[in-house]
Amino acid sequence: MPRAARSRRPPAALLTVAAALLALLTACLLHPAPAAAHDATSTAYAEVKGAGGRVEATLDLEYDLLMKSAWLYAEAYDAQGRAEQLRQLRRNAGAVTEYVTGRFAVTHADATCAARPAGDADVHTRGTRPFAVLTLVYDCPGGADGPYTVSSALFPDAESFVHSTRTIVHYDLDGERGSQVLTAGAPTLETGGHHEPHQIAEFFLLGTEHLLFGLDHVLFLLSLLIGARGLRDILLTATAFTAAHSVTFLLAATGVVDVPGAVVEPVIAASIAVVAVADVVFRDRAGAGRWRLPTVFLFGLVHGLGFAGALGIDARWSWELLLSLLSFNVGVEAVQLGIIAVVFPLLVLVRRTPAHRWALPATTVSIVVVSLYWLWDRVAAVAA
């Protein structure tokens, strides 16, 4: 075969990259980003505080999942609108309380604390999903000194509705504060001792998982990489994105800023489409670089709000809280740097071959299609 003919054939490695990108985009369409539809997994949130013989736990649980797990009828778990969901929670309070108290337990000095509901349940929105807010009071016998344990077996794999449920617990018990992620493999936290290394590792892992499996954030980063002109450009862009989302993440997670997820999640989807379209329309125009940093910084602020919403912290300021937040953010940055380190060199190789004439535009168009689908889906979920 003539050398010229061989040079026009895309290298096998580039075809592999194109296939991998296509697989990623297909996965995005088949499994919408977290705010777009019910994932195959779930996160429960718990604020636990108390001293002596009285502990109060406030739980945030996905409404439809809670009602299904309590083995209620479709009338309950398919309820739409806050008013109807509140009515269903009041109507089925006994079944809901029985389910939750059977799977979320507190002990003090090895004695089981008796749980009872405190007030009516509420409903609010996280992202675009309704969450039931339940408050339980645990009466602990004796009031003796000793450690507290908090255990969660909410929404286990055996129920078959979701898998790999995590319960993020923020606690303030007898003056000891901290955060811990409870899973099926490690379902219990115990006060006393030094938990900082474990806390750092858990929230670092939570941050890595959120970015790695948060396909909307991955596609936004991929759009930035496709539009970058060189290493300096990508370093400046990545720095702007990191600085922006770190600021709003910390502000939102500590309660300084509060923007509804119903606003944040559609804007995140729109940001992917805007950056991807700009890659196609403006990349080769004079002065095109001037729009990138301000736009990336602006959208980075919104993505930071999304990160905070996923972590679900609603606790007052403490050094223990800051440790969790920083560990989570470092995990996000570690995956972001890993994606850049792998994808950007491959994109440089693609641009040096004739394949870039079809591979990069095709990828960009696919990203736009996916992000617009997410935008439509999230707006529809908010309007429902």
Image (spheres, grey):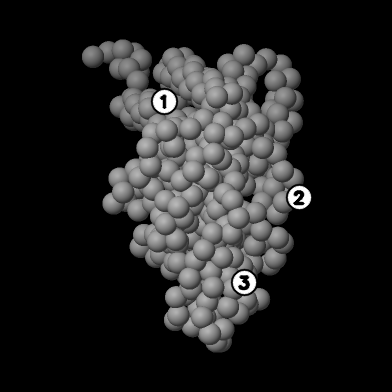
- How many numbered marks have been drawn onto this rendered protein structure? 3
Compared with 191, 14 (above or below) is above
- Mark 1 residue type: Leu
Query: Element at badge 1?
Result: helix
Q: Position of residue 50 (x, y in %)?
A: 62, 71
Using the numbered discs, state the Cα–Cα distance from disc 1 to disc 3 in whole angstroms. 45 Å
User: What's the distance in space between the residues labelled 3 and 2, CA to CA?
Assistant: 24 Å
Residue 265 quadrant = top right
Question: Residue 125: which disc?
Answer: none
On residue 256, the disc is 2
Residue 112 visible in the snapshot: yes
Quadrant where the N terminus lies? top left
Mark 3 lies on residue: 50
Mark 1 — residue? 29
Answer with mark 1 or mark 2, whichever residue precedes in sequence. Answer: 1
Q: Residues within 10 Å of mark 3 (few under 14, many from 20)?
A: some
Residue situated in front as seen by the camera: 183 or 24:
183
Residue at 31% in and 49% down: 159
Q: Secondary structure at mark 2?
A: loop
The reply to whether the C-beta atoms of the residues labelled 3 and 2 are less than 8 Å apart is no
Count neighbours of disc 2 (C-alpha within 10 A) and say few if under 14, some if 14 to 19, many if 20 or more.
few
Residue 53 sits in which quadrant? bottom right
Q: Earlier in the sequence, mark 1 or mark 3?
A: 1
Q: Quadrant of residue 223?
A: top right
Q: Which amino acid lies under the numbered mark 3 shown in the image of this protein?
A: Gly
- Name the front one of labels 1 and 2: 2
